[in-house]
Amino acid sequence: MAIVLPARSSYKEYADQLARIPAMDYAAARRNMVDCQILPNNVTDPRVVDAMSELPREDFVATRLKGVAYVDEALPLGSGRYLMEPMVVGRLLDAADLKAEDVVLVVGCASGYLPAILAKIVSAVVALEPDKALAERAEATFSTLSLDNIAVVSGPLADGYAKQGPYDAIIFDGAVSEVPAAIAKQLAEGGRLLAVVNGADGVGRARLVHRYGDVVSGRDLFDAGTPTLPGFEREPAFTF
C-alpha cells in the first residue's frame, strides 16, 4: 500500500491508513533510507552510516508513525518537538568530525534518536532534555537498546549543560534562530558545534562552529529546513 505523507499539521488524518498496512519490513526501510537519503547526500563517515543502518528509527516515534519512520521528513513527538529528518541528522554528524574518545552534548534529547547514533560512535553522550516525559521515554529506549554511555540530564535548553563540560562536540537536535554564546563557550579547545540556524530570510542553514582559545568562528555548510526547538524562535522584528 502506498503511503501519502501529509503536511505536518495533519499527521493524525492518516493514522487509520497506517493501521491497514501489513507488517512492515523495517530493516528494508532502514536500508532504503541509507541508500536513498544518506549516502547520496555526501554522508561519508562510515561510522555514521553504520549507526544509522543499525538503529531502529521506528523505536523513537509513536506507534501511529512507525510506518513513516524512515521518510525524509521531520516527525512530531508532541509538545512542539520533532524527530529531525534523517538526511539532516546524517549530514550534521558527518560534519562533526567525531572521534571515539569524544564527549558530546546533545541540546534537545527528545525521544533519543540523535544521542543513540552518537552513542555508537563516541565515548560518552550528555543528552539535555527538560521535558520529563520525553526524557523518560528516551531512557527506556536506551535501556532496551543496551546503550549505556548516554546520560540524560534536565535543564533549560538555552543554558546548555556546563556542569559536564567542556565538550568535544555540541549538536542541536532541532533548529535555532542563532547559536547561543553561552553554549558555544561550553566547547573544549578545538571543539565543534553543529546546528541548523534559521536565518532572517527564512532559510535554514546547517552551521559548523569551532572554538580555538577565546575565538569562536563558524561557517554555513548546507541549506536545511527542520522545525525550531521551542525557546529558540526568532524574535519578531520591531516595526513602527
Image (cartoon, rainbow, N blue to C red):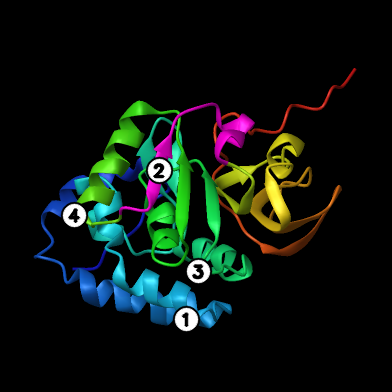
Estimate the spatial distance between the alpha carbons at disc 3 and disc 4, rounded to whole Å. 39 Å
Check if mark 3's residue and mark 4's residue have beta carbons within 8 Å. Answer: no
Mark 3 belongs to which amino acid?
Answer: Ala
Instruction: Please tell me whether mark 3 or mark 4 is closer to you in this view.
Output: 3
180 vs 16, nearest the viewer: 180
- Give residue 218's quadrant in the image: bottom right
Residue 83 falls left or right of residue 164: left
Q: The disc labelled 2 sits on which kind of residue?
A: Ala
- CA neighbours of label 3 inside 10 A, class few (<14), some (14 to 19), many (20+): few
Precedes in sequence: disc 2 or disc 4:
4
Residue 97: x and y in percent read 62, 70
- Mark 2 or mark 4, whichever is nearer to me: 2
Does the rendering let one see residue 37?
Answer: no
**Residue that mark 1 sits on:** 46
Q: Position of residue 185 (x, y in %)?
A: 74, 41
* Marks 1 and 4, the one that precedes in the sequence: 4
Q: Nearer the viewer, residue 54 or 150?
A: 150
Residue that label 4 marks: 18
Which residues are the magenta region?
148-164
